[in-house]
Amino acid sequence: MIRFLNNRYKIKPYRGRPFRVLIGVVLSHRTTDKVSWPATDRLFKLAKTPEQMLELSEKKIAKTIYPTGFYNVKAKRIRQICKTLIDKFHGKVPNTREELMDLPGVGPKSASIVLSFGFGVLTIAVDTHVAVISSRWNLTKEKNPEKIRKDIHKKIPKSLWGISNQLMVEFGREFCTARFPKCNICPVQKLCPYEFKNL
């Protein structure tokens, strides 16, 4: 199914600078890409490093990233992350899951995104799309993102890990939506084991 869908979407793994990916992840929480990506662009026109980011006031960051959800909370979190990066990691984004999760507000999903898209580490970040689709494809019965990640790592070939998150996001937006999947027009419907297909 993954290979079939990749022929449709032609996914090329996204790569970005680790610090930009990290801040982009913070801004994406409970916010659509259409809002969070432009907000990231606006913020990085003002500051490109943790040191430069700390020169901006919390109020300035909040104003710049508006209208992302919880923009005041995110502005405070961004400054906390930057201070931690400087104090503990010499201003560099760490490249291990454990160290990334030492940063304020960075959980397993965010750490996986930074590892994958910032450092090119082969891993599958488990967001809502990945969790829903993995369950419907019988790749996991777990609800916890970390347990889901471990399950799907066992079942999806490692050579496909780099494109799996982006691929499932595209597929989830177009067909395998969380509430009402469009199984009747899904291109992999005949391959899909989901027992409650919306036909």
Image (tube, rainbow, N blue to C red):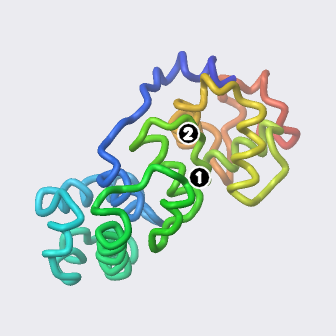
Placement of 55 over or under 132, stated as above or below: below
Between residues 66 and 144, which one lies in front from this camera angle?
144
Residue 96 lies left or right of residue 198; in this view the side is left
Q: Are the residues tagged 2 and 1 within 8 Å (C-beta)?
A: yes
Quadrant of the drawing holding the N terminus: top right
Q: Give the residue displayed 50% in from the left and 68% down from the top.
A: 102
Toward the right, the furthest residue is 195
Distance in Å between CA atoms under marks 2 and 1: 8 Å
Between residues 5 and 182, which one lies in front from this camera angle?
5
Which element carries disc 2, helix, strand or loop? Answer: helix
Placement of 72 over or under 48, stated as above or below: below
Give the residue type at disc 2.
Answer: Asn
Which element carries disc 1, helix, strand or loop? Answer: loop
Q: Give the residue displayed 37% in from the left and 76% down from the top.
A: 77
Q: Give the residue displayed 74% in from the left and 60% down from the top.
A: 144
Residue 132 lies left or right of residue 136; in this view the side is left
Residue 165 tag number: 2
Around disc 2, counting alpha carbons within 10 Å, would you say few (fewer than 14), some (14 to 19), or many (20 or more)? many
Give the residue type at disc 1.
Answer: Asp
Q: Give the residue displayed 24% in from the left and 65% down from the top.
A: 50
Give percent across and percent down for residue 151.
78, 43
Between residues 88 and 147, which one lies in front from this camera angle?
88
Give percent across and percent down for residue 86.
29, 69
Which quadrant holds residue 188?
Answer: top right
Placement of 11 over or under 198, stated as above or below: above
Quadrant of the drawing holding the C terminus: top right
Give percent across and percent down for residue 171.
57, 35
Mark earlier in primary sequence (2, 1) = 1
Q: Which residue is mark 1?
A: 127
Placement of 10 over or under 125, stated as above or below: above
